[in-house]
Image: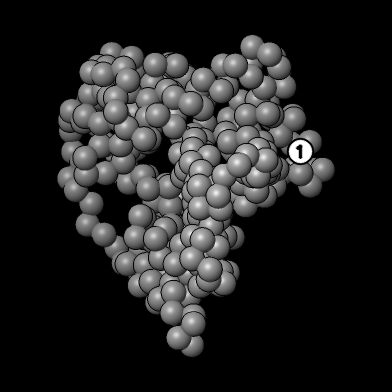
Amino acid sequence: MRHRFFLVLFLLSLLLSYVFASTPQKEAAVTGRKSIEGIVYKAPWNKEGQYVLKAEKYNVLLIADFGDAYALSKGARIKAYVKLTVPVGATNPGEFDYRKYLLGKGVRYQAFVGEGDIEVIESNPVSLTAWGASVRAGMYASLEKFLGDRSALAMAIMTGEAKSIDDELKESIYRSGLAHLMAVSGTHVVMFLMPFRKVLRTRHLNIWVRNLLLVLPLLFFLVTTGMTPSVFRAVMSQIFGIIALLLGRKSDSLNVLGFVGVLQLLRNPYSVYDLGFILS
């Protein structure tokens, strides 16, 4: 059992997180319109016209009546004048719970905004979240330029951002059983890392330098894909595998999975509601 310490710790953390998430939380008063400042960006799971506003105390899902705007999608510091509302939860047993879905994404409130409700304070803020969103926006612009209509599918496979895929193509993908290609996870991480492993293996580098350099593309992939639970699990497992190799230790997959699970629950206890976390 001592060799499964982090697995046991994870199971305990999972139980505590579930109890915490299931306990009704007293929401802050959201009556009237208020001014909120923070980093706005487009997360991979956002639909057309949706953004996440990362404020100081909580995250807000902004639903814009003007669709997608590049200035906001790529990440910016803004001040939004909005009326916050608590997302509606399930009203019947077994029904899809939209509130829990958003909590699993780290979002507590939602708000509808128009162009006149937003003031851009800083176009290029210093933020990992904004940087990742900027990379995704730049990738999509480049893919659209060279691939045209096929850019949406390429973007979905690379980052999990499937908002631009038309409904007919999306339905065809689901029917063909290939929907997992758009759910970025461990397979994508391994494939992304392959060329870096090959290139670094041909260089005259010692094992420490070669393996530590592999951490950089892993972190890049993590931030670019929005640090979703499935990618977080896959990337951190790879990093801990590299550390174990360098220290001459055997990597225990269950122990690593348990430790990564604890880290994810510390980031967001409501991850117990996220399908990507559950499947991971």
In the image, 61: left or right of 178?
left
Residue 104 as seen in the image, left or right of residue 58: right
Q: Residue lying farthest right?
A: 176
Q: Is residue 3 left or right of residue 62?
A: right
The amino acid beneath tag 1 is Ile
Q: What x and y, as percent, mark residue 77?
A: 27, 24
Asked if residue 239 shows in the view, the reply is yes
Name the residue at 19% across, 48% down: 28
Where in the figure is residue 113, as x and y percent of width and height?
33, 23
Within 10 Å of the Cα at label 1, are there few (<14), some (14-19), or many (20+) other Cα atoms?
some
Secondary structure of the residue carrying tag 1 is helix
User: Outermost residue toward the front?
Assistant: 204
Inspect this view and state whether residue 92 appears. no
| Left or right side of 264 for 250 | right
Q: Position of residue 248 (x, y in %)?
A: 53, 68
Q: Tell me the quarter of the picture where residue 32 sits.
A: top left
Q: Percent from the top left, x then y, of residue 150?
A: 72, 22
Above/below status of 38 relative to 101: above
The residue nearer to you, when weighing 86 against 213, is 213
The relative height of residue 191 versus residue 133 in the rendered view (above or below) is below
Count the numbered circles shown: 1
Of the 4 image quadrants, the one containing the C terminus is bottom right
Tell me where residue 238 sits by quadrant. Answer: bottom right
Q: Nearer the viewer, residue 233 or 47?
A: 233
- Residue placed most toward the observer, 198 or 121: 198
Residue tagged 1: 173
Query: Which sits in the foreground, 97 or 20?
Result: 20
Residue positioned 44% across, 74% down in the render: 6
Q: Residue at x 48, y 69 (%)?
A: 258
Which residue is pictured at 71% across the width and 34% down the height?
170
